[in-house]
Image: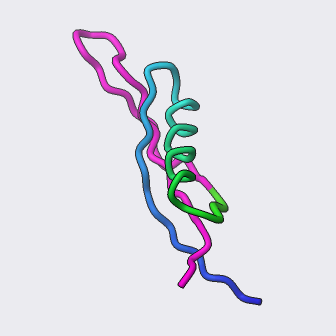
Amino acid sequence: MESTYKIIELVGTSKVSWEDAAKNAVEMAGKSLTDLRIAEIVKLDMTVEKGTVASYRARVSLSFKYQE
């Protein structure tokens, strides 16, 4: 049986690390999407406030099985 997948982009945030930011994005998506397949880190950045890192951000490309 052939399948079709949809790809979306999400930005997860964390005050701890980029890994946590990516994990947060995937886990939040998992609450409303089913059949998640692949998560790819597209970009890492951080927000800076008063010269220090305020939060880490991970842009994640996430694919899931398309259901009609």
Residue at (42, 33) in percent of width and height: 13
Please give left or right for residue 48 compared with residue 40 in the image: left
Quadrant (top left, top right, bottom left, bottom right) of the N terminus: bottom right
62 in the magenta segment: yes
Residue at (43, 51) in percent of width and height: 10
Residue at (55, 47) in percent of width and height: 26
Q: Quadrant of residue 36?
A: bottom right
52 in the magenta segment: yes
Relative to 65, say whether 36 is above or below: above
The secondary structure that dominates the magenta segment is: strand
State which region is magenta.
39-68
x, y (%) of residue 42?
49, 49
How many numbered marks have been drawn onto this rendered protein structure? 0
Relative to 19, say whether 55 is above or below: above
Residue 37 or 40: which is nearer the viewer?
Answer: 37
Please give left or right for residue 50 compared with residue 16 in the image: left
Type of colouring: rainbow
